[in-house]
Image (cartoon, coloured by chain):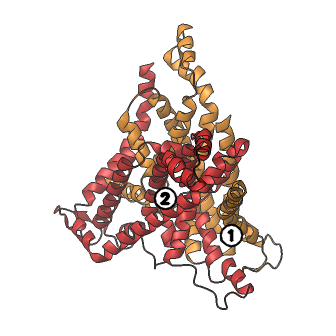
Chain colours: A red, B orange
Amino acid sequence: MNRVRAIALTPGAAVIVVLFLIPLAITCAYSALTRGAYFGLGPPWTADNYRRLADPLYGMVFLRSFALAAASTAICCLLGFPLAVFIARSGRRKNLYLHLVILPFWTSQLVRIYAWMFLLRETGLANGILQALGIIRAPLPLLYNDGAVLLGLVYAHLPFMVLPLYAALERLDPNLLEASADLGARPWTTLSRVMLPLAAPGIRAGAVLVFVPCLGAFLVPDLLGGGKSIMIGTVIQNQFTTARDWPFGAAMSLVVMVIVLVLLWVGAGRRGEDLL
Amino acid sequence: MKRALALYAVAAYAFLHAPLLILAAFSFNRSRYTVWTGFSLDWYRAAFRDHQLREGAWNSILIAVTATTISTAVGALFAYGLWKRRSRWLSASLYLSLITPEIVTGVSLLAFYQWIFQFWRLHLGMCTVVFAHVSFCIAYVVLVVAARLRGFDPGLEDAALDLGATEWGIFWHVVLPYLKPGILAAALLAFTVSIDDYVITSLVAGVDSQTLPMVIYAMARRGVNPVVNAVSSVIVFGLGAMILISERLRAS
């Protein structure tokens, strides 16, 4: 039995090593090289690329990305918790409601972001309705700012929060909530002393699953933030395309990767499974 | 309390679904502005006639079909190989590849390709895109197939062994038929993930391998365009249908 399994494992292991681990190792090496005249890069080995990250300009980008990712995580948690409670308590329709959360998540990421461009632009539906109702006279600049980026990040990642929250809440024994109420706890006390502690693993998993992709987001800040709300993902992409400073871009990617690893280690462990 | 929760759920589902439904509705609008002036299929006709969109769609389908075939075969075998075996670093790498931000995966693949090109005279194109897609699709396939394997009764394997089946025969005649719905579901999922990718694809694509998301992105960058609304609606409903079929298969 073991021989067939070992053979079955080989091509997949090869893909993981050659197309994931080796590229990461090469990025590591690139991050310590010097940028050449036009496109080339080579020795001397240097730590300059990492030192440049201390530049306040990039510090601001890191700070903004952290703040936006943290805010998105918090908002996703606040919006997702009641929804997860609703799904976990809906009996036979559970699966239907769960699918309604997953469905937009699997359909095109690009299209979902574009849909918000369509709604928020100057002559879009949001401004049109506000003007028709007489609330505003001139169209509001809803697009190309931090608010639009935050909205896009929350919209794109809400399912990542709802699924692990639901998985945790579903396992929660409803008798515990009844017992808490019978013993005279107010709804708020039951929520904070019984429900939240029991849902904590789900919250932690969801927080990692939302924070990590938000931190490295490229499409949302690029399309909804225009050039005005720049995040780490935008800068990395720029280093590898227009700016052509690969070593610096590689250094930045690795910093992101280290943050991801630390978060995984602290937070969710193998909770990625809950997503599917 | 219960009613408040239900009301909230209605609002939350509206938030999740309304943007796409509104976009789809306005793709049938005669006017190019966000004012309803009448039903028309003009934007769909225009999208269908657009050469860039057609070429992009063709490339996307070609890449997605190839990447899906490879990643499904390799991923399903991998899930079977990993079953009942503890290989912590292999599964850890797989999960890590799933959660690594796309931009990091993309630039590291680009760096890897450029490094290889020093030794072989190759260039970025369909091939590099297909390999990149295989690398990120495989984790989804493994997760779906592994989930199906968890429901498999190991007693069946022992029974087949007792009846004189070879190791290979067991895989082919006992395990594979059981896995079939899971593998099909995994393939559909891999296809939707592959056909929609922009971030990684745009970094490793060449001039001859512009995909549909790349064409749409370039159009969207220039602003809202009714032709994009039409293409977007087709994509959303096409992929939505595939996901529903995939979910059905997994539930069976």
Report x, y in % for residue A129.
72, 81
Q: Which chain carries label 1?
A: B
Quadrant containing the N terminus of chain B is bottom right
Q: Which of A214 and B214 is in front in this view?
A: A214
B144 is higher (above) or lower (below) than A250: above
Horizontal relation, residue A246 to residue A16: left or right:
left
Residue at the spot of label 2: B201
> Residue at coordinates 45% horizontally, 68% vertically from top-left?
A68
Secondary structure category for the residue under label 2: helix
A110 is higher (above) or lower (below) than B180: below
The amino acid sitting under disc 1 is Asn
Quarter of the image where one finds residue A112: bottom right
- Which label was assigned to residue B229? 1
Judge if badges 1 and 2 mark residues of a common chain: yes
> Residue at coordinates 68% horizontally, 72% vertically from top-left?
B227
> Residue at coordinates 70% horizontally, 63% vertically from top-left?
B233
Viewer can see residue B118: no
Q: Mark 2 lies on which chain?
A: B
Secondary structure category for the residue under label 1: helix
Residue extending farthest left: A44
Label 1 crowding class (10 Å Cα cut-off): few <14, some 14-19, many 20+? many
The amino acid sitting under disc 2 is Thr
Horizontal relation, residue B54 to residue B76: left or right:
right
Residue extending farthest right: B38
Report x, y in % for residue B214.
54, 65
Horizontal relation, residue B117 to residue B130: left or right:
left
B86 is higher (above) or lower (below) than A16: above
